[in-house]
Amino acid sequence: MKALFILLVFLSYSFASELTLGVVPQQSALKLSKKWLQITNYLKDETGINVVFKTKSSIPLFEKELYSGAYDIAYMNPYHFIVANEKQNYEAFIRAKKNIVGIIISKEKKADFSFDNLKNKTFLFPAPNAFAATLLTKFELKEKFNFDIQKHGKILYVNSHDSVYKGIARDVGYLGGGIIRTFNNFKDPIDKEKINIVYKTNPYPSHPIAYNKRVKKEDIKKLEKAFLNMPDELKTLLSIKEFIKTNTAEYDSIKKIGIK
């Protein structure tokens, strides 16, 4: 009987669900893994689902995987979600309660956003489709200051938010795009003192966690409950105070601003 019990336990683990969780690389893969492996261990303990952390070395590589449907569930920016929903029918189910805001970083205390000052300046962004850090900041510079970066500025994409902040501190670019969460998490003692937030965009729904429709609904319900009940110390790792339920329709506001 003991052998039978051990066999049944082994089989129950062998046939447990396994889901890949793709995470957009706003920071280096090493930094992300230190945080998210603790999250996936918690999710496994709470749900019995073996959630496997995945990321890529750059946002464009992550996009390629996401848009091919490689991830069962994924933490992505709102623009990524709009595209992933169209291409692979991903559905949003969880997000941070706090809305997302893009920021512009400068070594100056107060930036001059006039056309003459910005013309031919170099702008640093993490990736072409980073939502708040790139798309929102570009959009609002054009809408509010009548400055089209694509036409009148120089753009460097540097793979991560941290690289933007370092680049501005070290005079690689004049202005850079980011978000408040990654700026707060940027701890470099020398570079951090050299940079300032000089502009904030309007707020929009934050990064969703979305699932591919191939994932079983009962697994999503378990994961939803686990995210909503996540201990504060784990949420702190992600710089998130509270998770809330969301849905795909909430992100229709992203389409309306004309980014896509």
Image (spheres, rainbow, N blue to C red):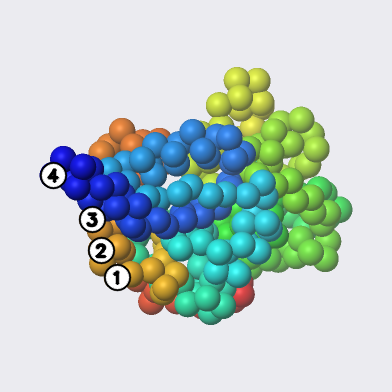
| Disc 2 and disc 3 in contact, CB within 8 angstroms | yes
Q: Nearer the viewer, residue 24 or 195?
A: 24
Across and down, in percent, residue 128 comes to 70, 60
Q: Which residue is mark 3?
A: 225
Secondary structure state at the residue bearing disc 1: helix
User: Is the residue 236 above or below the residue 144 in the image?
Assistant: above
- The residue shown at (78%, 42%) is 173
Residue kind at label 3, given as amino acid type: Lys
In the image, farthest residue toward the left:
1
Q: What is the CA distance from the residue labelled 2 to the residue labelled 3? A: 6 Å
Mark whose residue sits in front, 4 or 2: 4
Q: Which residue is mark 1?
A: 217
Q: Which residue is mark 2?
A: 221
Q: Which residue is mark 4?
A: 1
| Disc 2 and disc 1 in contact, CB within 8 angstroms | yes
Secondary structure state at the residue bearing disc 4: loop
Q: Nearer the viewer, residue 205 or 230?
A: 230
Residue kind at label 2, given as amino acid type: Lys
